[in-house]
Amino acid sequence: MSDECELRITRLGAQGDGVAETTGAPVFVPFALAGERVIADVDGARGRLLRILQPSPDRIAPVCRHFGTCGGCVVQHMSSNVYRAWKRDLVVSAFAARGLDVTVGDLVEPGGKRRRAVLSAERSDNGVAIGFHEAQSHALVAIAECPVLDPKIVAAIPALKTLIAPLISKLGARLTVTATKSGLDVLLDGIERKLTPDVRSRLASEASALQLARLAIGNDIVVETLPPFLTFATADVVLSPGCFVQAVAEAETEMVRRILAAVGKVKSVADLFCGVGAFTFPLAARAKVLAFDGNQPAIAALNAAAKKATGLKPITARVRDLFREPLSPLELNEHDAIVFDPPRAGAEAQAQRLARSKVKTVVAASCNPATLARDARHLVDGGYKIESVTPIDQFVYSAHVEVVAVFRR
Ligand SMILES: C[S@@+](CC[C@H](N)C(=O)[O-])C[C@H]1O[C@@H](n2cnc3c(N)ncnc32)[C@H](O)[C@@H]1O
């Protein structure tokens, strides 16, 4: 049952929604701003914005025509000041919820566009569409423009649509596109049927004609015209299909700069959750690095690049599940500094071991302030002091924020 109600929005929630405190529970209204009076269609804790009776002076026009339907961006409608304060506060609140009263730095905005897009492809009565899902829905919004994506990815969408059309059913598929230094690296997941030799050879020649660096379908590399690579310090790393990369190169540069500044002049560093080595190689310009990640292809890619890279200290990279088998305090103590950059779930088991170690400097990078704060609590309880917490706007217009936190003992 939904109800049309007049609401007064008093604050912004963690997902960027306007929140109205009612006599019952709070109501969350996407695209409403603090200070606004709105009419919303309210169903339980959610309100659909129908009309704005009194707009906030901080309301601005969105930069993209898809804003409001495409679920990729949640906050293009607020002034820069409100946006910056809200993003920073996501981090402040996460730390406060763990009883950590820290000074969180201002939001750093490195700019840049996303070099990685995870898109959906679906067949409908009007043909194949590629885009993002609507918020809280399975409906696809076909993308004609996108202010956050690398323009090379947006420009390739019409050609990708034609390329993959024969493979796409109503069930849909996932398309991971990465802009690498040798061209677009395209991975299509969720295709059930096996490729016939004819289809395969057509796909290979069309992908080459489009100058894609690589086209992979699931685990099958259909064609690799050029090895798709990214450069970290002096290392050219050929990516494994769909492996993790930081979404925005400029944000990665900012993270690396802060990590290196915090680590300082050291002899030995462990880089935990290293992926393909975005931090490993810059760290190895000054110290020997022991690197771990649970993803075997990522470690293979890192090791292959390490063999060819010049001017770096020794790198040892190994596959290890750091949730099940975190480094022990004894293993940690062999290093002057530890860098960890886990997935959204965080690194609780590893943080608990770190709390019992004697390592002087720990630097955490995280895309989830909630799990970072939980892990920081373990470090603080183990005697670490939080030296700095810096939010970095890697995921512009979304409710996500990257954070680099420095701990010392
Ligand atoms: C946020 S990414 C960081 C990668 C790298 N630091 C970078 O900047 O590119 C998180 C990494 O954690 C790895 N990972 C996820 N679960 C893991 C686990 N249980 N043990 C070890 N690594 C894991 C993923 O493979 C991924 O490379």
Image (cartoon, rainbow, N blue to C red):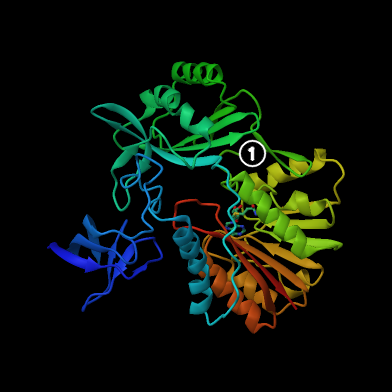
Along the line of sight, the residue nearer the viewer: 341 or 188: 341
Total marks shown come to 1
Q: Residue at x 86, y 51 (%)?
A: 313
Q: How crowded is the residue under tag 1: few (<14 C-alpha within 10 Å), some, or many (20+)? A: many
Residue 245 in view (yes/no): yes
Q: Quadrant of the N terminus?
A: bottom left
* Distance from mark 1 CB to nearest ligand 1 atom below 8 Å: no
Residue 55 at x, y percent in the picture: 29, 58
The C terminus: image quadrant: bottom right
Give the residue furthest to the front.
Answer: 57
Residue 132 placement (x, y as % from top left): 38, 42
Q: Residue 110: x, y in percent?
A: 61, 50
In the image, 5: left or right of 133? Answer: left
Relative side of 70 to 25, left or right:
right
Q: Amino acid at mark 1?
A: Leu
x 60%, y 57%: residue: 108
Quarter of the rendering containing residue 268: bottom right
Q: Please, what secondary structure does the residue beneath circle 1 have? A: loop
Please say whether residue 44 is visible from this viewpoint. no
Residue that label 1 marks: 239
Rendering quarter of residue 114: top right
Q: Is residue 304 above or below residue 335?
A: above
Relative to 254, 139 lies left or right: left
Placement of 286 over or under 165, stated as above or below: below
Query: Quadrant location of ligand 1?
Result: bottom right
Quarter residue 195 falls in: top left
Q: Nearer the viewer, residue 63 or 322?
A: 63
Q: Position of residue 53 (x, y in %)?
A: 21, 59
Q: Is residue 330 left or right of residue 326?
A: right
